Amino acid sequence: MLAAVGAKSIEELFSTIPERFRLKKPLSLPGPYSEAEIIEYFKARAAENSYGYTSFLGAGVYNHLRSVVTDTIIQRGEFLTSYTPYQAEITQGTLQAIFEFQTMMCQLTGQEVANASMYDGSTATTEAVLMAERLTGKRRVLIARSVHPEYRDVLKTYAKNSGLQVEEIPWTANGTVDGKALQSALRDDVCAVVVQSPNFFGAIESVAPLAESVHAHGALLVVAITEAVSLGLLKPPVEADIVAMEAQSFGLAPSYGGPFAGVIATKDKFVRQMPGRLTGQTVDSDGRRGFVLTLATREQHIRRERATSNICTNQALCALAATVHLSLLGKEGLREMAQQNLSKAHFALQQLEKTPGVRRAFAAPFFNEFTVEFPRSVKIVNGHLLREKIVGPYVLGGAYPELTKHAVVCVTETTTRQEIERFAAAIGNALQQPV
Amino acid sequence: MNERNEGKQFPKEFHKATRHTNQNEGLIFEKSSPGKRAFDLAPLDVPEADGAAALGAAYRKNGVEGFPEVSEIEVIRHFTRLSTWNYAIDLGMYPLGSCTMKYNPRVNEFVARLDGIATEHPLQPQSLSQGCLKIQKLLESCLLEITGMDAVTVQPAAGAQGELVGLLMIRAYLEKQGDARKKVLIPDSAHGTNPATAVIAGYQVENIRSNAEGQIDIEKLREQVTSDVAALMITNPSTLGIFEQRIPEIAEILHAKGALLYMDGANMNALAGVTRPGDLGVDVMHLNLHKTMSTPHGGGGPGAGPVAMKKMLEPFRPVPILVEKEGGELALDYQRKDSIGKVKAFSGNFGVLVRALAYLLAYGPGVREATEDAVLNANYIRKGLEGVFDLPYTRPSMHEVVFSDAKQKRNGVSTMDIAKRLIDYGFHPYTTAFPLIVPGALMIEPTESESKEECDLFIEAMRAIAQEAAETPEVVKTAPHSTRVRRLDEVTAARKPILRWKPAE
Amino acid sequence: MAYPAKYRYTKEHEWIDASDNNLATIGITDYAQHALGDVVFVELPKSGAEIKTGKSFGSIESVKAVSDIYAPASGEVVEANAELQNKPETINTDPQGAAWLIKVKLSNPAEISGLMDAKAYEAFIAEKEKEASA
């Protein structure tokens, strides 16, 4: 091949790189290793993690059942090793699956149009706010402090240079957003009000009345959802203008934080300000149904500095996994899964409440996460739990200094009754230990 | 041309592709019938909670309207049938320029799914996460070695987010010196993400024009780098597949004015193991792990866009950063006063990082050979097609080559037509109509994964299409002829968008 | 398609009909329509908006491109063509008639005299086409 290209050596192909910058010795990298050695390396690392522990952590990443069918499908090379479906004639598989994903996200959220996809729930929330800014031309953002702390952090990073002013709204004694505080902060210069439901404390927000007061001031209501399984039992936030959702709960492994799949769902009338890819139905030149990427003029490869977002690579395979997972669960399966989460979380609360000094912190309805208050620092309690091979609930004191004795407990369909009982007993033991 | 004259329109005596049957398949919702399901849960082992009582007004009385109800084999068949309508690297050469569609090793998939890796919660105690953190640490050190940089962050979820992190760090660094400045310079050949990102970072975009050789015009650059300029975003090799030879000088020009040099590392597959951006004067860059480090594109994502930087930018990295405590224990540090903040929840697309490390462990210092093969393949294809297609920029090619459709255009055949016809020959099209500075571009990147035989077949196909464009242009202009759908009506799709399925009324 | 004599034209391929002194009509030319290809969406200002000579007042989208529309003269928008929201394709079929974009109350009608007349515009695009084929 070298002869064919007319080069005497491989080195010659790199002659445009100034000689003094060409590396003279091999890079200092580990390897090369064989397949077996690579597997061995990662198995050794896996053994250094939490294997064998029971976890009560949620906080935006949930341990739900995942069928082997989902993983089998997304590992098909035709899906796994295909690019963004710009060449529609030979990517109809990906395109139709995305169309099905968009449909499912609309069905779940009660919105009219959904994209596929954003990086995760945190960037979807931020992008939803930026979208609201474009739609309203206003610059103030009100976000409930009961929204996931890391989601709020991401919003602040993006907002800083976009001229957005972000203000936080407190919560009430029942754990939901403080309507009075919101009302007094709401003026006609607000582009978006952001709440999460169920919120970071597990409390379910009342979306409809919130929407009413937000709309009265010409602002848009953004509802963030971190636990998408809740939609199996919760009314969809139809009154929201934009829903920003994390779809990790639909068949995606926790994977130490990613890759997940963020989604934005909204009303048809807002679609031209929505970021992210969209698939649309059309026909081919013989009149057969087919699918194409559409409304691409919103995107960076066409509109460049005036694009709705800079997103290019997204989380397509994760969105496919969610589509397969939801097809497997179906209408009844999703409902049953959600029902099991609800039942087990409520059972867990009852068990914990039996322990003297442990109390439910907020009275608002909850789905599969709830906040409890301990008579002492949660960190100490969790330290004791670790010794019993239990990863304790999320410690609120870090992000909320006023809640050092509070923790968010998460229970899903994967948590067994026995594990819940052991957890409650372990907490009882922990609280009896000397400080 | 109303009828499909299959005999004439299907390539003759071409070995790579023949017609095959695939199955028709409707939407999953159209297969649905009430009561079917494909997934069993273990029986509930606690008392069932009363949903209406527990949730009150928020309770959804019925299941999600319109949701599919199908059996397991129906799900398998549905998605398997859909999959067969896709082209993929696993089926053949995927020469999309600028996308680096190389082989995605299966061992990477296997290790990312291991219990103890896929199962780990990002907020679990760090004492129980040492394995994950060690993986991250090793990957970070490999990326530093390859880029010649001092520090790295693996938080960005994709290249575009990496760009944003890079620019936000530049901004924070300049701000700390008293002036964040106003503008970012971007060549006209750049990816669209560059200008889109600069705006989110709060900068105005100023374009800089390429010279006749497809390189940055150094004299013009000197004029454009004023005290208002925060950075230049450069892609190297450029999107023309040409190495920006005077990059050290470009860095000097910027540095002399207090501006920084950002490198879009999308084309790192041309450099890894051969030269290091850090040595060339680059201050900060991102890598696309889904390009250079072989993690799968998955139909559009997920990716990962780690950002590597020089020491002065290190304090501004997104939190958390990975630190090594005394005694060797690894930890995540959130307390960093100069940090730009977070750009994504948790630490990054960790599953993608695992795959990238598996790739690097398989190659080791051999990443240099991968780079060499990628560049050799691109030049081999260039040689095979030179003269047949117009080559607007003739400087030596690195990992990709950009032709134009100028010759074929005379017969009314565009780069898009040629791309579509390539499908009939069993290949995925190259990148069309990019970079913007080449009208009617054909941007071809074979990667190191292709054998000489596959490259020869590609050259043969492209030459045959060029001949068709001259002799029977209609065949090319109406291609593809062998796919299950023909060219789709994108105009109606955009005018009257149908973006979701709805039940028939 | 012929270029009406009563219109005036810009180098960015907009036309303006200022024959009614109080109310000018603005659109894009047939040449522009051709160059854009199939129009799929039009973004226009609301009535009451100010437009400024040489500045963009809206955009026209095809499947893979967005083009700005520049104001041939300054003034206040009185009406935007609402029909185009549902039927953007009219821009391809009748750009110089039914697919007018906005009606404007000009702030300085004298500005129009600086624009090309139909003859000058035809010569201008003939030159453009020659360049393109060279």
Image (tube, rainbow, N blue to C red):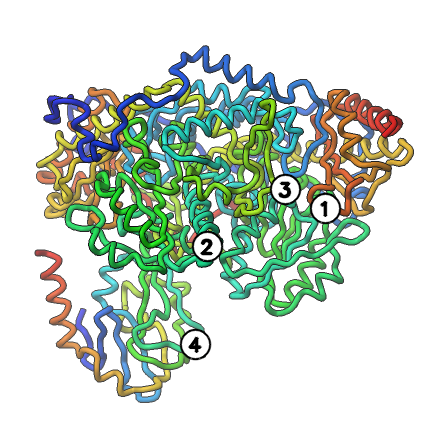
Q: Secondary structure at mark 3?
A: loop
Disc 3 residue type (three-letter): Thr
- How many numbered discs sit on the rendered protein? 4
**Residue B324, position as x, y percentages in the image:** 56, 28
The residue singled out by tag 2 in the image is B177
Give the Cα distance between marks 1 and 2.
33 Å
**Residue B258, position as x, y percentages in the image:** 36, 53
Q: Find out whether the residues at labels 4 and 3 contact each other: C-beta distance under 8 Å.
A: no
The residue singled out by tag 1 in the image is A400
The subunit carrying tag 3 is: A
Q: Counting other residues with Cα less than 10 Å from the Cα at mark 4, is it few (<14), some (14-19), or many (20 or more)?
A: some
Disc 2 residue type (three-letter): Gln
Depth check: give the residue in front, C112 or A170: A170
Give the Cα distance between marks 2 and 3.
39 Å
- The nearer-to-camera label among 1 and 3 is 1
Label disc, if present, on residue C49 of the rendered structure: 4
Q: Secondary structure at mark 4?
A: loop
Q: Counting other residues with Cα less than 10 Å from the Cα at mark 3, is it few (<14), some (14-19), or many (20 or more)?
A: many
Drawn side of residue B501 relative to residue C76, left or right: right
**Residue B349, position as x, y percentages in the image:** 51, 34
- The nearer-to-camera label among 1 and 4 is 1
User: Seen from this angle, which residue lies furthest right?
Assistant: A356
The subunit carrying tag 1 is: A
